[in-house]
Amino acid sequence: MSREIELQAIVALLTMLAEQCGAKVSDNRLAFYANELSPHGAVPVCNTLKAMNRSATRFPTVAEIEKAMGVGASPLDTEQLARDTAERIYVAIGKRRAQGWDKAQIDIGDVGVATVELLGGWKLLCETTREDQAPTLKAQWRGVAEITAERMKRGEDLSRAPELAPAATAMLEGMKRANT
């Protein structure tokens, strides 16, 4: 799923939430909310918004939605987002390997997509990920995801790889050679 489709899904659920609460929310505010929430991944955001739609009596802030998701803006929350992203990448590789990158992007969110790209891409991760290496790989992915999330918060250009990316890529290439 493309980022645009993810944002549309989030906006649709935010619109439903606003209607339920009787709030008049501008399109600009909905777009802002969607952009702020999308780094957490479309699936977790949409699941949280669906749950909030059952009982909300007023339109929440971004922070309240993030709190309901168990994430937020503190450094500790960035660490949690990175842990969640690494886990979602691992699960997506097991679940979506055969279905391809388009389906996996839905599961891993924007931070996950950027992390996978920095680590050499979906194909490379699928080829090099083995169950016996899961703890090590998740720790490495978590580190890249944390840096990526921080860079996204600062609005940095993600096409410029951070210093860690070449080391991570070299590590993955070495693992690939060891697996063949």
Image (cartoon, helix red, strand yellow):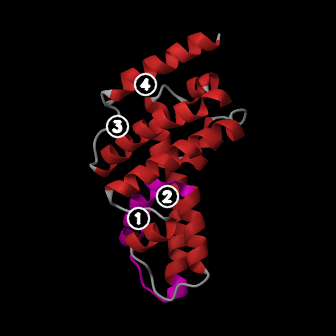
Q: Residue 168: which disc?
A: 4
Q: Residue 63: which disc?
A: none
Label located before the other in sequence (3 or 2): 2
Residue range in magenta is 19-42
Label located before the other in sequence (4 or 2): 2
Residue type, mark 3 in image: Leu
* SS for callout 4: helix
- Mark 1, residues whose alpha carbon is within 10 Å: few (<14), some, or many (≥20)? some
Query: Is the C-beta separation of discs 1 and 2 under 8 Å?
Result: yes
Question: Can you tell which of label 4 and label 3 is closer to the viewer?
Answer: 4
> Horizontally, is 8 left or right of 96 in the view?
left
Tell me how far mark 4 sits from mark 3, CA to CA: 16 Å
Question: Can you tell which of label 4 and label 1 is closer to the viewer?
Answer: 4
Tell me how far mark 4 sits from mark 1, CA to CA: 34 Å
Tell me how far mark 1 sits from mark 2, CA to CA: 8 Å
Residue type, mark 4 in image: Ala
Q: Residue 7: which disc?
A: 2
Residue type, mark 2 in image: Leu
- The stretch drawn in magenta includes residue 71: no
Tell me how far mark 4 sits from mark 2, CA to CA: 30 Å
Residue type, mark 1 in image: Ala
* SS for callout 3: loop
| Residue depicted at x 47% and y 55% | 40
Question: Can you tell which of label 4 and label 2 is closer to the viewer?
Answer: 4
Magenta portion: prevailing SS class: helix
Tell me how far mark 3 sits from mark 2, CA to CA: 19 Å
